[in-house]
Image (cartoon, rainbow, N blue to C red):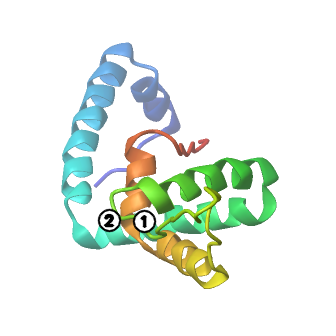
Amino acid sequence: MSENSLKAFDLFKENPKLFALYSAGIANQARVSMHQISVDSEFQQIFATVIRYLILVELQFNETFRSQLTRLAMQEAITGENPRILLSFLPDGNLADVSEIDIKSAIVNQLTDNGPLNQLLERNVIKFTFNL
């Protein structure tokens, strides 16, 4: 195996035809790899854990994010696919008190259940960007 010279490296990297071929190859391999990774249940669990961690950090330190996500979480807790809090009315038409234990339980379940998190990501309600 021979060493690549810096001059050869520069010619390789700056060649438009080779760049186009390499770019197409990278895009194609990315599609193949994404499919392999996305169907891997271990990856899905790890990905959900990383996303959950980033959300938890934002919930602690970003007041705007916490406010927006609180409204979504409250809505999901009572009208989602799996309502976590049952609401009822008093005879006078006011909302019956919701117990602190019900609220705490709903919050814990929402932050540990991948379902609501996946729905928010799939609907682009929560977006993450990475800078290279």
Q: Report the side of 129 relative to 26 (left or right).
A: right
Q: Give the Cα distance between marks 2 and 1.
A: 6 Å
Task: Give whichever of 48, 17 is nearer the camera.
Answer: 48
Marking on residue 16: none
Above or below for 23 versus 56: above
Residue plotted at (59% across, 65% down): 90
The residue indicated by pointer 2 is: 44
Q: Position of residue 46 (x, y in %)?
A: 40, 71
Locate the C terminus by quadrant: top right
- Which secondary structure lies at badge 2? helix
Task: Give whichever of 61, 105 is nearer the camera.
Answer: 105
Task: Give residue 104's quadrant in the image.
Answer: bottom right
Give the residue type that dot 2 points to.
Gln
Answer whether labels 2 and 1 touch (C-beta < 8 Å). yes
Task: Give residue 15's quadrant in the image.
Answer: top left
Q: Residue furthest bottom?
A: 101
Residue plotted at (53% across, 52% down): 75
The residue indicated by pointer 1 is: 48
Give the residue type that dot 1 points to.
Ala
User: Label 1: few (<14), some or many (≥20) within 10 Å?
Assistant: some
Q: Position of residue 91 (x, y in %)?
A: 58, 64
Above or below for 106 versus 21: below
Residue plotted at (38% across, 14% down): 16
Residue plotted at (28% across, 73% down): 42
Task: Give whichever of 8, 83 is nearer the camera.
Answer: 83
Q: Where is residue 93 in the image (x, y as percent from the top left)?
A: 61, 56
Locate the N terminus by quadrant: bottom left
Above or below for 22 versus 54: above
Task: Give whichever of 5, 74 is nearer the camera.
Answer: 74
Q: Report the side of 10 relative to 33 (left or right).
A: right
Task: Give residue 61's quadrant in the image.
Answer: bottom right
Q: Position of residue 82 (x, y in %)?
A: 35, 64
